[in-house]
Amino acid sequence: MSKRGIVLSSVIVALLGAVLVGHALSGERRRRRRFDPARMRQMMQQRMKEQLGATDEQWETLGPQIEKVQTLTTQIKGGGMTTLMRGRGLTAEAAEGEEQTDLEKATQELQTALADEASKPDDIKKLLTALRDAREKSKEELAKEQDALRKIVNVRQEAQLVLMGLLD
């Protein structure tokens, strides 16, 4: 084979490889775009319902209460990351136009102040205090919602919820 033939063959192989890699990557992008947060949440709820051994009728009461506890737990424990991700559109927790909680607002305000090199220490301290106050308020609300959940589950379900980290 001539030098010209080898070069031509190499170019063809390289182009073919580039086309195949591009095709594979575009397929991966399509698969990623198909991720449906609502479907994932529904699957997780179904699995939780099964783990708790709840009937459809029981789940009508348990499901919304568990969701309240999950949301508050995520806000308190996830705090800044949840707010940061939500602000960038990376979580499905906030529906379009849904208002932020006081904890999310306080977290975002502190993050904004920290990102600004011109922020004064006193301003940061005030925002930090506001965040701690909002977090404490959310913890109190979580405790109330956990108590309400404990009242509607049996001992086996309560134990499962403790293992899942939703009850203490």
Image: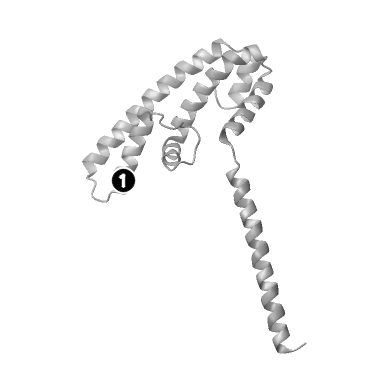
Figure colour scheme: one colour
Residue position for label 1 = 114
In the foreground, 118 or 96? 96
| 99 versus 62 height, above or below | below
Residue 129 falls left or right of residue 62: left
In the foreground, 59 or 20? 20
Q: Position of residue 116 (x, y in %)?
A: 28, 48
- The residue located at (65%, 71%) in the rendering is 15
- The residue located at (37%, 25%) in the rendering is 136
Q: Where is residue 37 in the image (x, y as percent from the top left)?
A: 56, 35
In the foreground, 99 or 4? 4
| 154 versus 44 height, above or below | above
The amino acid marked with disc number 1 is Leu
Residue 66 falls left or right of residue 104: right
Q: Residue furthest bottom?
A: 2
Q: Position of residue 48 (x, y in %)?
A: 64, 24
- The residue located at (46%, 26%) in the rendering is 72
